[in-house]
Image (cartoon, rainbow, N blue to C red):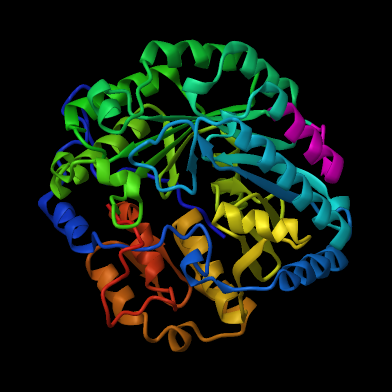
Amino acid sequence: MKSHMPSTSCQNSNAQARAGAICSARVIELLQKYDRPGPRYTSYPPATEFKAMNAGIYLDALERQSQLYGDTEPVSIYIHIPFCSSPCYYCGCNKIITRNHDNVRQYLDHLRKEMALLRLQSSVYRRPVTQLHWGGGTPTFLDDAEVTELMHLTAHYFNLQAGKDRDYSIEVDPRTVTRERIELLRGLGFNRISLGIQDFDQNVQKAINRVQSYDEIVELVGTIRARDFRSLNFDLIYGLPLQTLESIQETLSQVIALSPDRISYYNYAHLPERFSAQRAINSQDLPTPSQRLEILTTIIDALTGAGYLYIGIDHFVKKDDPLALAKAQGKLRRNFQGYSIDKAADLIGLGVSSISTAGNVFAQNEVQLEHYYRALDANQLPVARGVVSNAEDALRREIIQQLSCFRSLDIAGLERDYKINFAEHFRLALPELEQFERDGLIVMHGQQGLTVTTDGTLLLRNICMAFDEYLNRGTPLRPMFSRAI
């Protein structure tokens, strides 16, 4: 499949000029027209469609995968650490705010039970773990001994790899690590690290209860570079309270100076009815929709002007990054960790609220900690929800993957591989696709395919939504989704 290199929606000929350039009135009108809630499509079906599920369905799927591919087929592992010592007001993650470190002991003991049960009830432990990711919460809430214990537990119950081609990553709150901690993480085998930056402006940091100085980040980045991590990622957010075009420009200047390999620039979803911590944010301090549009185009212009590729929804990478190469080779995939190289077909999620994928099955653990503990204390895997996707889901998932990863759709290939007539099969979506084309968001190439235009790049989620069978187009979209812009 042909991949399309990203470009900005509004070009700025002077890098020192007002960043974000001056978007045409037509583009602004389009962005406002399509700025509505929708899934981020880290999975399809989205997690909002998960229903009650028995752990046996998940275990059977794991065994089918092992029988189909054999014990040499790679697998990924995600471990969720839910604890944080203080709330970040913007956060919508599954987390537990506590300063009582005794909670960690109980959690690690139950993680060990989950690993042991999985090893007893499946053969997935034989498969090589090529990708490992610790997320949260704050994984570095754990102290040095606990971090070491958890890595050793994982190595005991699963087939961790020592080769250079492994991707072992961890999310880090910069306020929780020292030079010695970074050295420990590297020594334990992590070779990718992601720093939660969010924003460098002090007023914004105070408004979201996430204060960390730029000088501290500079020192930390120096330590990470010295320890030869393969990749450094920055997580940032736009649309936060008190952000302005000028403050974003300054943050971007500082980010570019630090030169992370990857940048995830997420759109803040203000959903105080779902996330209680967000009620501490004054909604009047949030940028207006027009300001968010200007901030977004500023971000894209500044980062692409600095040599980053805009590879898809929220994500930027350097041109020589493995993700950029995977995109060019047609091997880029989008999953629960954002974008990744397609190194493993199955993902084992461990810990409270974690999501696993095995073949056509998505399975999520209990999201309440007491329920997670209760299941494991009864010697049961803590799977609570999930979905068994069908052939139609697989077709639409492939379409959403192609659009979100390559900004194109191989219609002829879909017709051949899935034995469908595209126009007939997606007749309900055709009016929306025709409107997208009239609005200049896509270009149709007859029966061969379609490509997303430069303007359409900003609205990839909307274009994917046209193929989402689970969205009820007769009623307003549910408030659980963030807005497109």
Residue at figure coordinates x 52%, y 70% from the top left: 45
Q: Quadrant of residue 280?
A: top left
Query: How many numbered circles are shown?
Result: 0
> Residue 183 at x, y = what percent?
67, 16
In this orientation, does residue 335 appear? Answer: no
Residue at figure coordinates x 83%, y 67% from the top left: 63
Q: Which of 274 and 485 is in front in this view?
A: 274
Look at the picture and state if 329 lies above or below 240.
below
Quadrant of the drawing holding the N terminus: bottom right
Would residue 474 appear left or right of 351 to someone viewing this image?
left
Q: Which of 22 and 460 is in front in this view?
A: 460
Residue at figure coordinates x 60%, y 69% from the top left: 386
**Please, which residue is most extreme toward the left here?**
25
> Is 148 included in the stretch rendered in magenta?
yes
Region rendered in magenta:
147-163
Residue at figure coordinates x 67%, y 58% from the top left: 374
Main secondary-structure element of the magenta-colored stretch: helix
